[in-house]
Image (cartoon, rainbow, N blue to C red):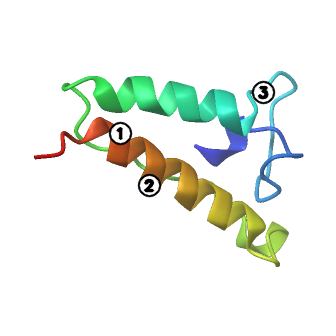
Amino acid sequence: MIDVFRGADVSAVYFPPRRRPNLSEGTEMLGALLRDNRVRIVEISEYASLRDLDQASVHKLIAMFAGSLQKAIPQN
């Protein structure tokens, strides 16, 4: 869920909690989840496109997910 991140890092959130991780911390958590072979699906939700008119948040999120997936998937 995108709403967990700080608004300063990802503006495309509706209800950011008071104590929230920054994007770097979120990337670290995502990496740990993706390394667990029990995790089969990751769903992205609550992306507020109307709060991301310049699409800066979506580009940050794509980079976060792509980088984390690349590290988690074994390369042959």
Between 9 and 67, the one nearer to me in the picture: 67
> Disc 3 or 2, which lies upstream in sequence?
3
In front of the other: label 3 or label 2? Answer: 2
Determine the secondary structure under disc 1.
helix
Which x, y percent locates residue 57?
73, 61
Query: In the rendered structure, which amino acid carries the disc numbered 1?
Result: Lys
Residue density around tag 3, few if under 14, some if 14–19, many if 20 or more, within 10 Å: some
Q: Going 81% across and 77% down the picture, which residue do you hit?
A: 54
Q: Residues within 10 Å of mark 1 (few under 14, many from 20)?
A: few
Q: Please tell me whether mark 3 sits on a helix, a strand or a loop.
A: loop
The residue identified by callout 3 is 20
Q: CA distance from mark 3 to mark 2?
A: 22 Å
Q: CA distance from mark 3 to mark 1?
A: 24 Å
Of mark 3 and mark 1, the one earlier in the sequence is 3
Quarter of the image that includes the N terminus? top right
**From the viewer's perspective, is residue 46 above or below residue 35?**
below
The residues tagged by marks 1 and 2 sit, at their Cα atoms, a distance apart of 9 Å
The residue positioned 82% from the left and 38% from the top of the image is: 6
Identity of the residue furthest to the left in this view: 76
The residue where tag 2 is placed is 66
Amino acid type, residue under disc 2 in the picture: Ala
Residue 51 picture location, percent across and down: 83, 67
Residue under numbered circle 1:
71
Task: Describe the element under mark 2 as helix, strand or loop.
Answer: helix
N-term mark: 1 or 2: 2
| Residue 10 on image: x %, y % | 77, 51
Which numbered mark, 3 or 1, is in the foreground of this view?
1
